[in-house]
Image: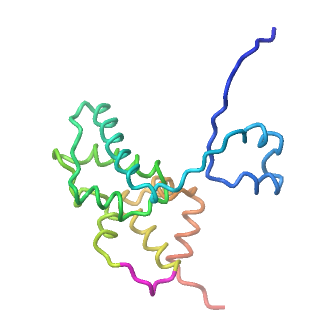
């Protein structure tokens, strides 16, 4: 027996769906059914005020789950979180880092030394315009891996890639090329 329902589908993606439609990788009819109202959000790194709101939201959420008081963040730590990290994993990366900080930090206030190494290093180092993109990417991957204790699954999630892609990037970045 059929039943009439009134629903609204809310979907999000980080893919360029029109391109996928053109390549035949996404059904055109489904795209047009879903594409009624489009809201485009800039990447998290361009939304500093949102970063601060989300930091406090996730800290409160995970503190409540753990039955702990919500930690404060020093002004310096908030500056690093807001200004000194590119957030390639967007909100998921931020949530994971705040979750880790709430679990791992002992004191009442989270300071710069409590932040993952990838953030502490980026806060201290002056940018160099003489580095290649491959060098910057390799360093970033190395720092993310260090911040998660070498766990490639978590690192891949933070980097926004799957494990296979991470393995390929590690191989390309850290294995010397073979001479023909």
Residue 11 or 167: which is nearer the viewer? 11
Residue 126 percent coordinates (x, y): 33, 78
Q: Quadrant of residue 117?
A: bottom left
Q: Nearer the viewer, residue 96 or 55?
A: 55
Q: Residue 71 lies in what quarter of the image? A: top left
Q: Farthest residue toward the bottom?
A: 180
Query: Total number of numbered labels?
Result: 0
Quadrant housing the C terminus? bottom right
Picture layout, residue 29 above or below residue 49: above
From the viewer's perspective, tell me whether residue 170 is left or right of residue 80: right
* Residue at (23% x, 50% y) in the render: 73
Residue 54 higher or lower than 125, as above or below: above
Which one is nearer the viewer's eye here, 56 or 105?
A: 56
Is residue 128 located in the magenta-colored stretch of the structure? yes
Horizontal and vertical percent for residue 84? 35, 65
Which residue is at 82% across, 57% downward? 23
Q: In the rendered image of this protein, does residue 1 appear above or below residue 144?
A: above
Depicted 120 relative to depicted 31: above or below: below
In the rendered image, the residue lying farthest to the left is: 107
Quarter of the image where the N terminus is located:
top right
15 horizontally vs 75: left or right: right
Q: Dominant secondary structure of the magenta stretch? A: loop
Position in image of residue 112 (x %, y %): 23, 60
Q: Is residue 139 magenta?
A: no
The quadrant where residue 38 appears: top right
Please provide the residue range marked out in magenta. 127-132
Colour style of the rendered protein structure: rainbow
Q: Residue at x 28, y 44 (%)?
A: 102
- Residue at the spot 47% in from the left edge and 48% down from the top edge: 92
Seen from the viewer's position, the closer of residues 40 and 24 is: 40
């Amino acid at each position: 027996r059929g039943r009439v329902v009134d629903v609204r589908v809310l979907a999000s993606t980080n893919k360029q769906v029109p391109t996928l439609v053109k390549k035949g990788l996404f059904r055109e009819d489904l795209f047009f059914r879903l594409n009624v109202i489009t809201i485009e959000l800039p990447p998290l790194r361009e939304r500093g005020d949102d970063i601060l709101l989300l930091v406090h939201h996730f800290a409160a959420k995970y503190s409540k789950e753990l039955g702990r008081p919500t930690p404060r963040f020093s002004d310096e730590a908030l500056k690093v979180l807001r200004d000194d990290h590119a957030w390639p994993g967007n909100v998921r990366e931020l949530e994971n880092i705040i979750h880790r900080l709430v679990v791992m930090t002992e004191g009442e206030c989270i300071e710069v030394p409590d932040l993952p190494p990838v953030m502490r290093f980026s806060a201290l180092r002056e940018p160099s315009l003489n580095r290649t993109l491959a060098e910057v990417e390799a360093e970033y991957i190395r720092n993310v891996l260090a911040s998660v204790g070498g766990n490639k699954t978590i690192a891949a999630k933070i980097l926004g890639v799957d494990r296979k892609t991470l393995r390929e990037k590690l191989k390309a970045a850290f294995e010397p090329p073979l001479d023909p």
